[in-house]
Image (cartoon, rainbow, N blue to C red):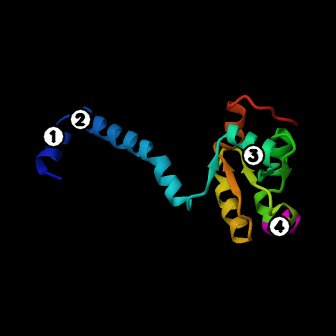
Amino acid sequence: MDASFLVFLQKNPWHMMLFGTAVVTGGMLLWPLINRLVGGGTPQVGASEAVQLINRRDALVLDVRAKGEFAAGHIPNARNIPMLELSGRLRELEKFKARPIVINCQSGMRSASVCGLLRKNGFNEVFTLRGGLNGWVEASLPVEK
């Protein structure tokens, strides 16, 4: 960086604030790309794509939220195995290896790590629900309690 640019920023607090705003908004624009690269390329599906997988290919919806979160509202016919219990309960999912699995949590953050765990254990068609249950609700899709 040129020294004159730093002098320019220091002359007025507004310059520093505008520069900081530009850096933050640039980071926000790049965040989805960075998240996708760091997330190991976890395949994601939107709510409408998940509905198609469920209806056309009999996909399993695996909800990895805690039991209390699941009881408060979940995708119809979803199976609940909390993320912390999943490694000990993988045997329950063996019969679903040939089917696509859509993993959801509340916002889509926890499901990426679960996707990696299932892939390591031989599940080939594993997808993360983009936006989690929040994305499902935003798409005006049904939730049952």
Residue 141 in percent (x, y) is at 76, 31
Amino acid under label 3?
Leu
- The residue where tag 1 is placed is 8
Which residues make up the magenta segment? 87-93
Residue at image coords 43%, 42%:
29
Q: Are marks 3 and 1 in contact (CB under 8 Å)?
A: no
Q: Nearer the viewer, mark 3 or mark 4?
A: 3
Whether the residues at callouts 2 and 4 have beta carbons within 8 Å, the answer is no
Q: Main secondary structure of the magenta part?
A: helix
- Choose the circle earlier in sequence order: 3 or 4: 3
Q: Which residue is mark 4?
A: 90
Q: Position of residue 50 (x, y in %)?
A: 72, 43
Q: Nearer the viewer, residue 81 or 18?
A: 81
Mark 2 and mark 4: span between their CA atoms? Answer: 55 Å
Tell which tag, 2 or 4, sits nearer the viewer.
Answer: 4
User: Is the residue 138 above or below the residue 88 in the image?
Assistant: above
Q: Is residue 130 left or right of residue 99?
A: left
Sequence-wise first label, 3 or 1: 1
Q: Is residue 36 shown in magenta?
A: no
Task: From the image, tell me which residue sits under label 2.
Answer: 15
The residue carrying pointer 1 sits among few (fewer than 14), some (14 to 19) or many (20 or more) residues within 10 Å by Cα, namely few
Separation of residues labelled 2 and 1 (CA atoms):
7 Å
- Tell me the residue that label 3 is attached to: 53
